[in-house]
Image: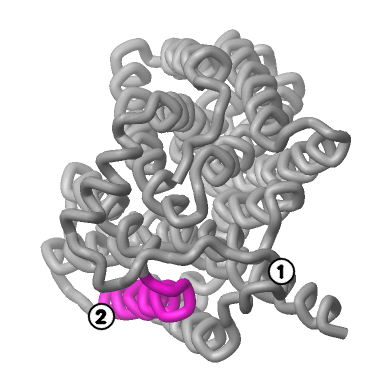
Amino acid sequence: MQDSRNRTRQRMTLLLLVGAGCINYIDRATLSIGNTAVMADLHLSYETMGWLLSALAWTYMISQIPIGLLADRLGGRVFLGASLVLCSFSEILFGLVDSSTNIFWTRALLGVGEAPLFLAGTRVLVHWFSAEERGSAIGLFNGSASLGPALAPPFLLAIMAWWGWRDMSVLVGVINLLLAVIWIVYYRDPISGEVSAPTPAHSARASLRSALKDDLGYLLRQRNTWAATAGYTGVVYLSSLYVTWLPAWLEKTENLSVIQAGLLSAFPQIFSFLGCFLGGRLMDMISQRGVAPLVACRRTVVLSMLACAILTGTLALQPGSIPAIVLLTFTLFASGVAVSCGWTLGTLIVTENRVATLEAIQNTGASLGGVLAPLLTGILATRYGSFGPAFVLACGIGLVSVVMYHKGFSGRALKS
């Protein structure tokens, strides 16, 4: 009976985190989906909209390490609940403000509110799932980063068609708030011995000096930290390329309308979601055959990232409509596997009390990749009148990521 209750709580915790991840990415899409309506209502230029679209990415990036240190010291129940409330507050404000300056600050606040989810959420999953079954759980959780963008266009476009962009944002904020209440009421950390004996968390009152020296300082001196960060930067560079520029690429290369390209771009994200989930399952299956989880994870991320890089380079050749769509689905599937296993790798090379801090370091590099991918792609597409050079660059970055994962690791986990 106890095992049955634990399994139910495991699954419900994972389900709530996946729901939060989907809402997290729908949050990010509200301005992207409503940008032309916002520009028309507030008389904004494309340059101003560019700044507004970048606000979330910058605050999300600079929040990672401080949030990671906090996540290793605070319980997941209140910390994640508070972050969802902050996201709700910023989305509701976005629907109420009437100037570009105020929109900028609501988006910047949203970036801070979203920063804890994948850091504290991963630490929660480490609490509830052993190393041998962790890949599937984290893969499904990370898959929400692909499922959210797939759900966002039809969901948000439908709401905006009925009620407009302001009410769309307010409704998304209310959904965030509802999820925050459910999480705070339902979630509890496992009791020692129920699932596995968790490594005790740092005291919330631990000194700043201890946090910087014993955790952040220690991790920054380790080769594996830098290898994981550099490798994951490449992983997110490629995934961000497709998230941000896929509609425009489809519109240009396949001669589609804006609406057709926008809706069609949601379809391949389903394959990215499947890659995230099945990549985690594959890693668990390899581990259950006697291969060390760290080795299984590294092998999977290396092979999937190699496939993603090569397929991206092939897409630069513009092979034609049907071959391009087929290649695109395989590319995003491989990207999903790499995203899932690259994130899981961080939980396997460090002890539980430093999981969020290590993932924060890794995600800072990943956020840089997420910022650079749309920027460099736009610059190259403008200069050459084609996405081909940008895809070749992305292929090269992907191959560098493969080298970092294959050669950069010392082959052992970090100690406490």
* 2 and 1 marks in contact (CB < 8 Å): no
Q: Which residue is mark 1?
A: 195
List the residue tagged with mark 2: 96
Q: Main secondary structure of the magenta part?
A: helix
Write the start and end of the magenta stretch as one range.
74-93
Label 2 crowd (10 A; few <14 / some 14-19 / many >=20): some
Q: Is residue 236 visible?
A: yes
SS at badge 2: loop
Q: Is residue 167 visible?
A: no
Left or right, 405 with reference to 8: left
For mark 1, give the secondary structure.
loop
Three-letter residue code for mark 2 = Leu
The figure's colour scheme reads: one colour
Along the line of sight, the residue nearer the viewer: 203 or 259:
203
Q: Is residue 15 left or right of residue 372?
A: right
Task: Rate crowding at label 1 as few (under 14), some (14 to 19) or many (20 or more) other CA atoms within 10 Å.
Answer: some
Mark 1: amino acid:
Val
Magenta stretch encompasses residue 81: yes
